[in-house]
Amino acid sequence: MAYADQEMSGNRIIAIIIVALIHVAVGYMLVTGLAIEAAKQVIERVTTVDIEEPPPPEPEDEPPPPPEPQEVAPPPPVAPPPPINIAPAPPPIRTQPTIPPPAPPVLVVPPPAPPAPPSMARGASPKGQNRWARRIQENYPSRALREETEGVVGVRVSVGPNGRVSGCSVSSSSGSSILDAAACKGMQRYARFDPALDAAGNPTTGSYSTRIVYRLN
């Protein structure tokens, strides 16, 4: 009997455990199910938002109809005013101040030049003509003496700055070539002159004309 009680006690314990497990499972299921249901309700509340639209505005009172237009008599015709011709303004007149005439140019008269010094120009003049003319006549050509030839020879000589004859030419022949040649030769050998002078008084080349007379005694 003790064995039987012991067996019954073991079975009872097992049954109590099974019942406890069942209660735990049912409780878990209940808790889990309630939690899911509560979550669904919260989600629905969050996602479902009731938006209340504002009520439409009440219609305002309609304005009264405009008054009917009254017929107005047209104004009497008015003639347009005659056109007015407005002349353009004349261009401005530019006046220039009176410009005095330019002053006449001042004539600058140079002072008179000092008078030129007197010219010192002169021609060649014979110096000691009687002496050298006598020597030329005394130097009578010997052939003309033998032939007893006489004559007058006109000569023109060039006188250098030194007063000596530098050239001679017969201006009028005596008719004897011997006497003509003797006259020019004698002039170049014996004749002496005061040379010609230029305006400043310097010796220069001049000329002189004379006649040589050949006569037999």
Image (cartoon, rainbow, N blue to C red):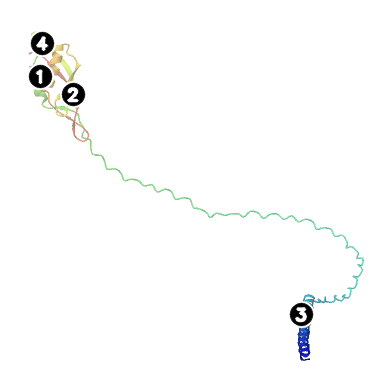
The amino acid pointed to by label 1 is Ile
Q: Are marks 4 and 3 in contact (CB under 8 Å)?
A: no
Q: In the image, is 21 to the left or to the right of 160?
A: right
- Return the residue nearer the eye: 190 or 27: 27
Secondary structure found at label 2: strand
Badge 3 density bin: few <14, some 14–19, many ≥20, Cα 10 Å: few
Badge 1 density bin: few <14, some 14–19, many ≥20, Cα 10 Å: many
Residue under pointer 2 = 158
Of marks 2 and 3, which one's residue comes earlier in the chain?
3
Estimate the spatial distance between the alpha carbons at disc 4 and disc 3, rounded to whole Å: 198 Å
Camera-nearest label, 2 or 1: 2
Q: Are marks 2 and 3 in contact (CB under 8 Å)?
A: no
User: Which labelled disc corresponds to residue 144?
Assistant: 4
Examine the image and state in which quarter residue 80 appears: bottom right
Residue name at image x 8 percent, y 20 percent = 135
Secondary structure found at label 1: helix
The amino acid pointed to by label 4 is Ala
Residue farthest to the bottom, as pictured: 2
Residue under pointer 3 = 32
Of marks 4 and 3, which one's residue comes earlier in the chain?
3
Residue under pointer 1 = 136
Badge 2 density bin: few <14, some 14–19, many ≥20, Cα 10 Å: some
Residue name at image x 8 percent, y 23 percent = 131
Residue 167 x %, y %: 17, 21
Q: Quadrant of the N terminus?
A: bottom right
Examine the image and state in which quarter residue 92 appears: bottom right
Secondary structure found at label 3: helix
The amino acid pointed to by label 3 is Thr
